[in-house]
Structure formats: C-alpha cells, structure tokens
Amino acid sequence: MQRRPRSQSEARRLARSLCRDLAAVELPDVFNPYRHNCAAHDAPHAAALRQNNLIAYLEAAIALRPETAWIGRDLGYRGGRRTGLPLTDEAHLEAFAKAFGAKGLSKATRTETCRERTAAEIWRAIGALEAPPFLWNAFPFHPHEADAPFGNRAHRRVEFDACAEILKSALRIFDFETVYALGADASAALTRIGVPHKRLRHPSFGGHAQFRRQMAQEYGEGSRNLPMNG
C-alpha cells in the first residue's frame, strides 16, 4: 500500500476523485447509493445527500488520521444503501458524526429510520475504542437479486473486478498500521488486490461474541470495557 499523501490537500483531492468514481458506477442488479434514488424509500435528491455524507466522512477521516481500517463486504439494504456510509445505518448517524467529527450528515430517506444488526454490532465495538477505525467495504455498493431489491447478496467476482480500483483508491488515501477484514469475503477481496490484513470473524450470523473477543485482543488498552455478552 502506498504511504499517506504528504499533505491534507492532496488527500482531499484523492477523496474527491474517489467520490466521483463511485458516483459513476452503473452495474446490473446493484444499487449505487451515490447515483441512484430509491422510489420506495428515498427523499428527493437522496443520491446527492449520500454523496455529501461520504465527502463529509472522508474529510473528517483525513483530519483524524485513523490508524486502523475495518473492511466489510458490501453495503446492506438496511444500512449503507440508505446512508451512503460504510457499516452504518440511520440509527447510528449521530454516533458516526460524533466519532469522526463529521459535520452535516443527513438522513437521505423519507421513510422510518432503519436499523441494521451488523451496524449495531460495529458501532457497539467502536464505542469501546479510544479512536474510531476507518470504515469501508470491499464492494462499496448494494448488490441484490433482480427480483429482490431490498435483500442482500454477496457481490460477484466480476462485479468486484469492475470496481477493484475504487477499493485501492480508498485505502491509498491513508497509511494504516493494520487493515482488518470483517469475514472471509472481505479478506478474499483484500487478498486479490494485494493488501496485507488480518481476518476477523464477521459479527453477523452468530459471530458477534468471537468478533468482540478479537477486537478486545487486537486493540488491548485501546479498547474500553467491550461487553462480551448480550
């Protein structure tokens, strides 16, 4: 991985370029929250609101300089599809803004605030850390079946390959001490682009207890009372 850009202005330039690249992606059976508006749930100009959320996040992260990164698989239909923020649902927008110091985050949907189980576990863990990690997804969009737009599926290899440069670009902005892959699919994606990382148990599907233990082990004194049960 390349070293951190020498100046914050260069990092911001790379972030703006990343946002433009994200918004340009169009793939079958893939919802791009920075390009598409959902007729069932979105407010007017929702894609633009999510773009603004992402820009505010990246600028805040550049200023914060996180030492670690957590990479998930895809955006979920109850989480990042709606917020435009990795591993974050609408119920945790306030926590996200506080953790990163991100200003101007907006709810981009007009329907009831949505909660996602994975986001709840992720933000429970982040709340126990002294500083937040950089959050991202190997495939930064919401893949779905053709007849089920509000369900989740794993991205396909051809879809990842079409967007692999975006993952490289996101990680190139920073210089992390450690990159963590949340689950086997995220680990496989990072391996395909040659990014050294540690694989952790994904907190979904009964993996939350092991995920919490691994977080406590990895962060040590940098974590505060992460609950092992519940």
Image (cartoon, grey):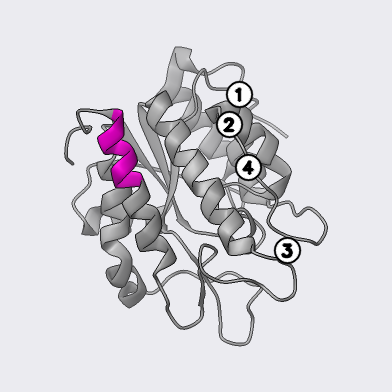
Helix, strand or loop at label 4? It is: loop
Give the residue pinned by disc 3. 43
Task: Say which residue appears at 60% left-offset and 46% top-offset.
Answer: 88
Do tag 2 and tag 1 residues touch (Cβ < 8 Å)? yes
Q: How crowded is mark 2: few (under 14 residues within 10 Å), some or many (20 or more)?
A: many
Q: Residue 226 carries which label?
A: 1
The percent coordinates of residue 176 (x first, y second) are 29, 31
The three-letter amino acid code for the residue at tag 3 is: Ala
Residue drawn at 73 percent across, 44 percent down:
91
The label on residue 125 is 2
Q: Which amino acid does label 4 sit on?
A: Leu
Q: Residue 139's spot in the image, x, y percent?
A: 41, 61
Q: Quadrant of residue 165?
A: bottom left
- Residue 174 in view (yes/no): no
Q: Measuring 16% from the left and 39% from the top, which residue is drawn there?
A: 2
Q: Which of marks 3 and 4 is nearer the N terminus?
A: 3
Q: Which residue matches tag 4?
A: 105
Q: What stretch is highlighted in magenta?
A: 8-15
Q: Which amino acid does label 1 sit on?
A: Leu
Residue 180 in sight here: yes
Residue 43 part of the magenta segment = no
| Comes first in the chain, label 4 or label 2 | 4
- The span from disc 1 to disc 4 (Cα, nearest Å) is 27 Å
Tag 3 and tag 1, C-beta contact below 8 Å: no
The CA span between labels 4 and 2 is 21 Å
